[in-house]
Amino acid sequence: MAIDLTDAGIARRESIDHGTLAGLDELDTPNGAPRSTINAQRMWAQAWPRLAALVLALGLWQLVVLSGWRPEYVLPPPRAVAGALGELLGDATFYRALAVTMGRAITGFALALVIGGMIGCAVAQSTILRRAVGSLITGLQTMPSIAWFPLAILLFQLSEGAITFVVVLGAAPSIANGIIGGVDTVPPVVRDAAHVLGARGCTLLRSVILPAAMPSILAGLKQGWAFAWRSLVAGELLVILADRPSLGARLDFARQFSDAPGVLAMMTVFLAIGLIVDGAFNCLDRRVRRRRGLLGAR
Amino acid sequence: MTAINIRGLEHRYGAGGAPVLSGVDLDVADGEFLCVVGASGCGKTTLLHLIAGLDDPSAGTIGLGGRRTSLMFQEHALFPWLTAQRNVELALKLAGVRDRQVRSARARELLSAVRLESHANRRPHELSGGMRQRVALARALAQDATVLLMDEPFGALDAMTRDLLHDELERVWQERGLSIVFVTHNVREAARLGDRIILLGSRPGRVLEEFPVAIDRPRRIEAPAVSALATEVTMALRSEVSRHGH
């Protein structure tokens, strides 16, 4: 077929091309139900495996108690622990202890975030710093937090400072490593694109590199939180301050009074807090990944 | 006026390495659409990176006369955590547009220029390959560059989308009076788009032959004149490639 190169022919062809382009855009754009739709079936599909695991664990626990392996004053049944937990939740002093512990956790984690973040950014950007302290950061990450307490107590005596010191040392290396690892995985084409656009120095780091590394940074933050929480509980068991009631202190008191239901109730509280924070990090992680198209439709 | 003036350009990766490019002399006129073809690994991408300032040449000079350059990559290279609108806004911010409202309005204009205003709030993974490259084009235009460097930007697209994007690119080029250096493997694409085609030889990369494209616009990729020129360039390219087989 001959191509019409008159003005009218060109105009007609351009009109068809615009329509074709819009049609292609429409056909190429994903459609379907919004991803965030929440329905009862989906919630049940997510909840039942967890509920089943919980019921199984409680059943096994009850079986061990019934077997008489240990007397009930040492290993109480789930019902006794549930009763102790109920009493704990109805006690106003528990919430004061919870506030103290969570305050320490947040303060320690925030400090670790600042220190680990600065170290991570500096090491990720400098070859010399990486050679100097890169492996040391990984070494610090593997060091058990309890090993820091003798030094912490020597440096800060039995004080808030000792607990904070260990919490920060527990979390900061993971946060720094998360940033270093994340920056290393930024695709070269993203760096090149940023360079071509004129991003340099701090602007490059803030506007492109750190956002690009965010999934790995979040993984580092999550691991940092886990280390901070472990360090904090260990610290509260070792450093008990008279005017600062804490969850760790209550756990230690329950042990000293041979209150096994109380010990297990406090452990349940620690577990619940850990699960809640982990759930929050997972939500954040899913959100970040979904925004980048890194999550499937499931 | 000459937009790009390249003299005696040489580039090696690492000291003592074999030259990737050697003795490249090239002028690109203001408003010219230059296509660069050559075998894989002949240094086409390196040439663009050197002009864009992503790398420094081992020898020779690249004169731009103060013109700003912008580079479009083989992959779209959009930032996946930002929407199409925000990708363009970030480019504007980095180009020195400080006022947020001005950035937002200009980003809308640029997305409109590539007919994507209705997809401004979508993220790259929610767009097709062709749409991503159009966002990348809008982002490149946001830099107010007069020299646009394009590294096989349509190589991964299907034939129909590529054909439509040729029309879009041609329209944007003519409206804005850009100088474009367009690297491609596709000789027919070069004949469809270029004012001139240069063939780069391999090992080392150098300008082997130039082909002026004396075909009236608007052109169609299936037009006989485009096919005839593409055949001529392909023969020269095959001759160069076969030289390395002996």
Image (cartoon, rainbow, N blue to C red):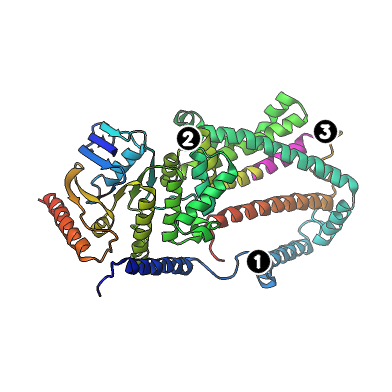
Of the image marks 2 and 1, the number of the one nearer the N terminus = 1
Of the image marks 1 and 3, the number of the one nearer the N terminus = 1
**Quadrant where the C terminus of chain A lies?**
bottom right
Q: Which residue is mark 1?
A: A46
Nearer the observer, B71 or A155 = B71
Q: Which residue is mark 3?
A: A241
Is the C-beta separation of discs 1 and 3 under 8 Å?
Answer: no
Question: Is A119 placed left or right of B181 in the picture?
Answer: right
Q: Chain of mark 3?
A: A
> Percent x, y for residue B228?
17, 62
Q: Residue at x 64, y 67 (%)?
A: A37
Numbered disc in front, either 1 or 3: 1
Give the CA separation, mark 1 to mark 3: 42 Å
Question: Is B11 placed left or right of A204 in the picture?
Answer: left
The boundaries of the magenta stretch are: A226-240
Nearer the observer, B50 or A50 = B50
Nearer the observer, A85 or A107 = A107
> Percent x, y for residue A220?
58, 44
Q: Chain of mark 1?
A: A
Q: Which residue is mark 2?
A: A200
Q: Residue at x 14, y 53 (%)?
A: B236
Q: Residue furthest front?
A: A7
